Image (tube, helix red, strand yellow):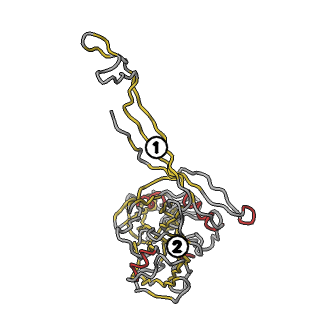
Amino acid sequence: MAITITQSPESFASLHDDLWHVVTSNNTTQSNFKYVFDIYVASNLVARLKVFPDPTEDCGAVNVSNIVRNYWASYFKPPTTQTAFSYEGNDIYVDYEIKFGEEYNGTTYLNLTTGTYKAYNFVQPQFRDWSTSYLGAFVNKWITNRDKTNLKVGLTDRLFVPYLVGTPPQTIALKLSVDGGGTLTGSGVACDSITMLDLSPVGINTYFGTNHITASTKQYTIQIGSGDILTIKIDCTKYSPETLHFLNSLGGYESMRFSLVNRREITAERRTYTRTNWELGSDVMNRYNTYKVLYPGQETFSVEQTIVHRLTTDFLTQTDHAWMKELIMSPEVYLEKSGYFYPVSIGTNNWSEKIRNADKMFNLTLDVNFGDKLNSQYR
């Protein structure tokens, strides 16, 4: 009995692609032969698949993506106290194991060969170099497609930016420069595969233990090792800004500040019933009561309010406008209010590319919907 693995998914494979596993055996001529694929997640057997050999190739092939992706879960767990290292773990991927076996002549032979794999929660771009792993290019880097020279934040906002570690655990230290001054290096923190960093003024000051970023600061930079430098600008606005946090297409959580005019729109849905506008009392029909309040012919017993927040960004670079496509298409978005994170959905379903030379200056307006409707007083 010999099972040989001939194909496995690429390094940094996506949960949302096909995850093909192909094996061969020297026993395919045996009676009623089948390949057996036992799929394990967190050491638990979650599926057993039996596959007849391909009639031409004699190999066994299964696509396990529909099974494995069911075991990914959100890891958006921001701490109540703002700090630079807000979350670190391995939740960007699902670890799974396949024990390959075979069955013939009425006997099943399990676990003849074993393989362990990781499938990451990111979306492949439409066009890419298929000879390499797309996410692999982001190892030990910020996993974001935003403009790294133009991040904006308020003094009390949170600003999440994710970082991908290739071989955990890895010790990470942040380098800070304020308004072009000297570089400060903070203490190292041991991190797993994915780290959600809060690079806001509060998060950075907490990490360094000193208020390096103050109300007089114009901008500051953050760097890890010799990697890309993030330039973060303090955003002052006369309007009431809003911040959305969302799962980007690379599998990390990050933040976007909407600092121009933000408005609410409310739509009411009323439920009513009809009644007589007369009532019997003291042996007569009355049109109104003793307080001279008329009896209505129609009663409203429920009013449901649908609230839409219409948010507007500041003027965007071409890079940031392209990055905003990821927010519109994100399945997981939160609106932060007074330290609470409210799950919302994006009501804007269309995105159109902007080109600086042709479109000059541009921003973006999004509709943000709440899942729960607000009820007025019941009657």
Please say whether residue 44 is visible from this viewpoint: yes
Which disc number belongs to residue 306?
1
- In the image, residue 212 lies at what x, y percent? 45, 82
Among all residues in the image, which is located at the extreme top?
A: 283
Q: Do the residues labelled 1 and 2 touch (CB within 8 Å)?
A: no
Mark 1, other Cα within 10 Å: few <14 / some 14–19 / many ≥20: some
**Residue 135 percent across, percent down from the top left:** 55, 72
Mark closest to the chain's N terminus, 1 or 2: 2
Q: Residue at x 64, y 67 (%)?
A: 317
- Left or right of residue 301: residue 60: right
Does 64 appear above or below 171?
Answer: above
Q: Separation of disc 1 and disc 2 at Cα? A: 33 Å
Extreme residue toward the right, this view: 358
Q: Mark 2: which amino acid?
A: Ile
Q: How many marks?
A: 2
Q: Which of 321 and 206 is in front in this view?
A: 206
Name the quarter where the N terminus is drawn: bottom left
Residue type pointed to by label 1: Thr
**Quadrant location of residue 291?**
top left
The x and y percentages for residue 194 are 45, 73
Quadrant in the rendering for residue 95 = bottom left
The percent coordinates of residue 267 (x first, y second) are 49, 41
Disc number placed over residue 234 in the picture, else none: 2
Looking at the rendered structure, the secondary structure element under dot 2 is strand
Q: Nearer the viewer, mark 1 or mark 2?
A: 2
Q: Residue furthest bottom?
A: 182
Q: Residue at x 44, y 61 (%)?
A: 68
326 or 354: nearer the viewer: 354
Q: Which element is circle 1 on? A: strand
Labelled disc at residue 339: none
Q: In which quadrant is the C terminus drawn?
A: top left
